[in-house]
Amino acid sequence: MDKILRVKMGADGGPQIVVEPLGDYAGMGGRAMTSAVVAKEVPPLCHPLGADNKLVIAPGMLSGSAAAMSGRISVGCKSPLTGGIKEANSGGQPSQMLARLGCAAIVIEGRPADDTLYKMVVNKDGAKIEADNSLKMLGNYDLVEKMKAAYGDKVACISIGPAGEMKMSAASIAFTDMEQRPTRHAGRGGVGAVMGSKGLKVIVVDDEGTARREPADPDKFKAANKAFVAGLKKHPVTGEGLPAYGTNVLTNVINEAGGYPTNNFSTGQFAGASKISGEAQAELENTRGGEGSATHGCHRGCVIRCSGTFYGKNGNFLTKQPEYETVWAHGGNCGIDDLDAIAELDRMDDDFGLDTIEMGATIGVAMEGGVAKFGDAEAAINLLKEVGQGTPLGRILGNGASVTGQVFGVERVPVVKRQAMPAYDPRSVQGIGVTYATTTMGADHTAGYSVTANVLGVGGNVDGTKPEGQVELSRNLQIATAAIDATGMCLFIAFAILDQAETFQALLDVLSGFTGQPCTADDVTDLGKSILKQEREFNAAAGFTSKDDRLPAFFKTEPIAPHDVTFGVSDEELDSVFNF
Amino acid sequence: MDKILRVKMGADGGPQIVVEPLGDYAGMGGRAMTSAVVAKEVPPLCHPLGADNKLVIAPGMLSGSAAAMSGRISVGCKSPLTGGIKEANSGGQPSQMLARLGCAAIVIEGRPADDTLYKMVVNKDGAKIEADNSLKMLGNYDLVEKMKAAYGDKVACISIGPAGEMKMSAASIAFTDMEQRPTRHAGRGGVGAVMGSKGLKVIVVDDEGTARREPADPDKFKAANKAFVAGLKKHPVTGEGLPAYGTNVLTNVINEAGGYPTNNFSTGQFAGASKISGEAQAELENTRGGEGSATHGCHRGCVIRCSGTFYGKNGNFLTKQPEYETVWAHGGNCGIDDLDAIAELDRMDDDFGLDTIEMGATIGVAMEGGVAKFGDAEAAINLLKEVGQGTPLGRILGNGASVTGQVFGVERVPVVKRQAMPAYDPRSVQGIGVTYATTTMGADHTAGYSVTANVLGVGGNVDGTKPEGQVELSRNLQIATAAIDATGMCLFIAFAILDQAETFQALLDVLSGFTGQPCTADDVTDLGKSILKQEREFNAAAGFTSKDDRLPAFFKTEPIAPHDVTFGVSDEELDSVFNF
């Protein structure tokens, strides 16, 4: 990866693409790249939808290589949802393909003079951008069909749906998967609204005629990668649980642990959990069309294979197998126990280009505000339709839980830094509460997935219902995660590398074999710390203080069943997370 | 004033009123009282609509006495609009009446267990509160008629309309005027939403059987008050301009100065200004019913008399004479040059219980977002109707310009701390820009009305189009204003006391004569500083930093016609406002 594509949307005479050398950004990938560009180039107090914001799309350091699991991509900007720095991460095919094209980052900057919509194509011959207003307000599915028809059945797409065009704060950016479907999303923080504000509908990526990125030390790399894959295969989560049921294997686990936020975080267990669990989902899928509950990867090079396909009642493809957080958001959090309804909501989110977590949390808040009844799946579907149509109610919901709470006068709004909390209650999984509170991202489970030691017994055991030990747990995970997000590795490798020292060593050797430079555990830690520090500095310059590193008050005053606990980590402890 | 009424909405068995001695709050009034109670008793990070927030209603130090102009009242809380401390100030009758009842503050705290709506009555025999769900969703006008029928034609009302009940962030609290109409409002920052969240619809105030508050040194007080009134009468603004045309005398003045924000702050002069000016308004009123353009006070003891009455086309009372900021907000800022339409919007704001400034700015943002066309008065009226009805679109608008901008993806949103800017462009009136940026209140002209020296030549001359001298100007005015807001004096006395040393001395003597204690200019300055410091500390604890003391970026990048200037006061200078 030797170049950055700068897409200057506001250039005189129309958008221009400038190919730049890497300069200061050499060697960076994924979150390290996106956060570095945003921190260096975006004024922290700019309007997120204005010309000064930049949208950065960056494959990981190892993307495009033969390293297993290296197909994740990072999207960075100043977030229209949180007002802070954002890195939203996605699977799908574009990471590997952009990396093979030598493209370390696409930086989309400025803003076109009018509301013309643009399409960009990147292939081995270079990159070009052109107006195409025929794409306006297309859903991601129709858009991708159109791109397939024009560019063939091997290209990948990075695109926004109507939500992004309407600049909604819950808008995602879709990345096509191995089946060329727009099912993988950089979901969080409204990155799709920023792409929409730039007038860019889609980036078509075509890696035909390119080669795999080769390691500096092929022997070391190959051996390490083999050991790394073996480690993933032998760990019960990455080798068994995830391949068997996908991420939704967690529903029963988290529900049994009393950490399953139900009816807008009112209680920690959902009576209908067993009806929407991964096990129930697999059983249902096996009665439908296609490959049943068999799983596959979301990108080339995946060996965990947690993705699946959801076929509707008519036996036809409806959507990818909804992920655990989606099933929770549209399911238990709204009191809904109907997998078909949840799958339909997931399909609509993907098509409109919306973050499933934010939308489920938002509908939960709307239900608490009296807009619909908990458990009413049909009402939830109708609400989401309004978002796609951009009605006033739809625009409220499409701007997320915080706006929806304000508009409907709801006090119990489960957000941090205005971003909705995911599928783990911070009172019974207090380590994730520390992550929600303190990560630079707004409430985000992937920023430091303390569910590992709090619930799953991975990487040790720290009782999730008590405040003790959570800060250290979250801190270490946040540091490690920032580094993993820079490599392009799927975060799910964490299960194996936390538990198996030899698998962690194999990862270090993969990195070292690829770059030809030494790579120690300390190097990885230093990388993670440096990314987090940069992000914290951006947020401070954007006006964030320790007061933004807090959970909403009701998590400290409303005990949650069944454990009857409140969030007990003190403010002083929270303020010590970034003491490095 | 020897007591505080604590209204405990969440008490077991239903709301209770506890009469308390003043304790630490002895001697305080108005903003000094409200900000002290909020700073001491409200957790800075609480939810503004939650049980922990408190609504404080406090007459000024001199209210209830014979001091001229002393009938202003302060309302304080944590603001649902800004998230910071709020003091919203109103005229009307309740201040004098509560003060005569000995009531230095009403503190409404906690929250009822259900959605029952309550009514409170304060009279010489005490205070009581009772459920009255028949009042639900009444407009302020119908509500007041009902209270008059029940409690007689001499009571005053403090009430919320449907907007407050719906907990909208632009909801105001209405205070009846001398004609027993709900035309005076503590408008800004969503104080009505806090009253709504407490389930309190109205406070009926009946001062029958009470006496005027008597000064400690009657001779000194009487002589000083006489000199003070003489000073107000001889100043051209308070003695001539305001009595002749009301506050709308400013339309032509500010427009000519190029400081009249037009079409959502796109330009500094409005082609239709002369059609909605105070002069045009007086001419129109003289062709209609009632007293024509004759003015009167909004409360007993007013000698400036800037209030008027607006009669509709049918010759019947429609609303009070719309104030300058209202005429601007619903007029020039939306490209509307129709006084009848503006008056109708003003009436609806008063009836629904909405801040006219926030609503006009919000409709301007909505127009920029394509919801309606600039200049379309009928569309503006229909939009405001939606707010009263609580439709989804109405709920968006009723939550103010910041939410509306986010929901419709608009970048140019003229807010500071999420509160909409009033009727003076901060590029051509840069002193008011400093006030907007730095006041604890969010964009608020009354917090430090630098229009005086920037445009009106009152209290000196500081060129409004240049950054030089604005920080000192705004600082001094903010300090003086905080003190005036504590006295219960109408802020319009500032014109005379800034220009006439003997009138300022008379004010000091009025204060000293009333309390029997010495009162120097330094004492007044110290009072103002102490109030501001307390407010700044609250905001810091609520998470505000210097980054919140900034104007939106477009004021620094978009020059405004006709002066072709941008806001030029540097961040460093802004950060020196509170260097005392």
Image: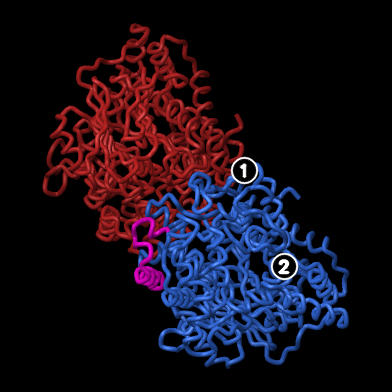
Chain colours: A red, B blue
Residue A211, how many percent across, how many down? 25, 15
Q: Is residue A514 left or right of residue B268?
A: left
Give the label on residue B571, or none: 1
Closer to the camera, A446 or B306? Answer: B306
Indicate the amino acid at tag 2: Ile
**Is B413 positioned to the left or the right of B231 in the image?**
left
Q: Chain of mark 2?
A: B
Determine crowd level at label 2: few under 14, some 14-19, many 20+ residues with C-alpha closer than 10 A.
Answer: many
Image quarter of residue A224: top left
Pinpoint residue B534: horizontal percent, then vertical percent: 71, 57
What's the chain of the residue with tag 1?
B
Mark 2 falls on what kind of element? helix
A376 vs A70, nearest the viewer: A70
N-terminal label among 2 and 1 = 2
Q: Is residue B522 left or right of residue A70?
A: right
In depth, the one of B492 and A234 nearer the eye is: B492
Marks 2/1: CA distance?
A: 28 Å
* Residue A134, position as x, y percentages in the image: 19, 44
Q: Is residue B356 visible?
A: yes
Q: To which quarter of the image does residue A370 belong?
A: bottom left
Residue type at mark 1 is Asp
From the viewer's perspective, tell me whether residue A42 is left or right of residue B24: left
The answer to if B366 sits in the magenta stretch is yes
For the residues beneath circles 2 and 1, the answer to whether they share a chain is: yes
Q: Magenta segment: does it hold A10?
A: no
Secondary structure character of the magenta stretch overall: helix
Decide: is B13 above or below B542.
below
Residue stretch in magenta = B365-389
Q: Position of residue B458 (x, y in %)?
A: 69, 64
Tell me if residue A267 can be seen.
no
